[in-house]
Image (tube, grey):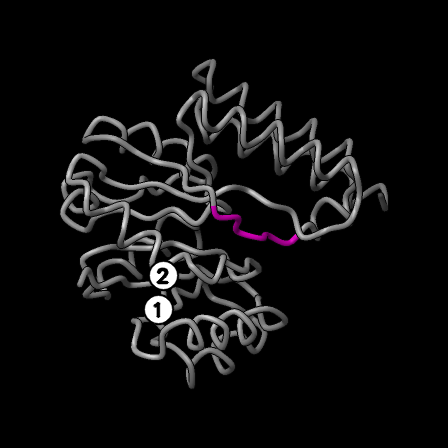
Amino acid sequence: MISISIIIPTLNESDTITALLRYLQELDPKIERIVADGESSDDTVRKARPLAQVVQATRGRGSQMNAGAYASSGDVLWFLHADCRPHHDSLKAIRGVLRNQKIVGGGFQYCLHQIGFHYRIAETLSNYKNRVLGLLYGDMGVFVRRPVFNEMGGYTEIPLMEDMDFSRRLKRFGDIVILPHKIQTSARRWVEEGYVKNSVRSWMLQSGWALGISPHRLARFYRFHEDRESALGI
């Protein structure tokens, strides 16, 4: 049987990490669970330790996911966000699809955990775009064969867009697949920041990346607007 290691990058996720780890333990008590923490200042590490191996890493999703991957032992690496909830058949689906040696990795259907017609529209458009363009984002529960991950050199440790960079490089090594099982992801950012603002910002960042703007410039743009809104009390 293909062994799977689950890697979860965290930063101040004390409100979500216990529920996810317990859920994953119920799916498979023996599966390797690794929390790669990026210097959390809350109780994330304390809450995670009874339920997973915890590794400390430099803050940043790319560096945290690399640290978790290098500490793991599975044939397949499965990267999850702390605020997600995978489908209960996800492990079976990953093992099943990877029997095809041409497939090097993939993800799952994107699903926002929030009631509202506009959220369903966002999901539908996102899933359609991802299928057509062959894109994998972090909140899709990305999985990859370990030898391929190692040959790729893991995630590029950049301040933003590490998932789009990873997806683009992964396709050079073989086929990728987006499985039909839905992975629920928290809509907390959508709710806190507003549907329109979050949609427009995501579109601008993705478009900027597609046009060749460096992730460092995009990160400065992102931080500028975050700092400006904080100063204005928005």
Magenta segment includes 34: no
List the single residue furthest toward the right: 233
Residue occupying image coordinates x 70% and y 26%: 200
SS class, disc 1: strand
Looking at the rendered structure, the number of numbered marks drawn on it comes to 2
Residue occupying image coordinates x 58% and y 30%: 126
Instruction: Look at the numbered discs 2 and 1 and tell me whether their residues touch, using CB distance below 8 Å.
Output: yes
Q: Which mark is residue 204?
A: none
Which is nearer the N-term, disc 2 or disc 1? 2
Residue type at numbered disc 2 = Ile
Towards the viewer: 89 or 153: 89
SS class, disc 2: strand
Task: Please tell me in which quadrant of the rendered image residue 228 appears.
Answer: top right
Give the magenta part as a residue range: 181-186
Task: Please tell me in which quadrant of the rendered image residue 75 appears.
Answer: bottom left
Q: Position of residue 13 (x, y in %)?
A: 57, 66
Residue occupying image coordinates x 59% and y 74%: 42
List the single residue furthest toward the top: 211
Q: Is residue 119 left or right of residue 186?
A: right
Q: Position of residue 223 (x, y in %)?
A: 62, 38
Task: Please tell me in which quadrant of the rendered image residue 101 appears.
Answer: top left
Towards the viewer: 52 or 60: 52
Q: Is residue 131 left or right of residue 110?
A: left
Label 1 sits on residue: 34
Quadrant (top left/top right/bottom left/bottom right) for the N terminus: bottom left
Label 2 sits on residue: 7
Q: Position of residue 127 (x, y in %)?
A: 54, 32
What crowding class fits label 2: few (fewer than 14 Cα within 10 Å), some (14-19), or many (20 or more)?
Answer: many
Towards the viewer: 155 or 81: 81
Measure the C-alpha gap from mark 2 to mark 1: 5 Å
Residue type at numbered disc 1 = Ile
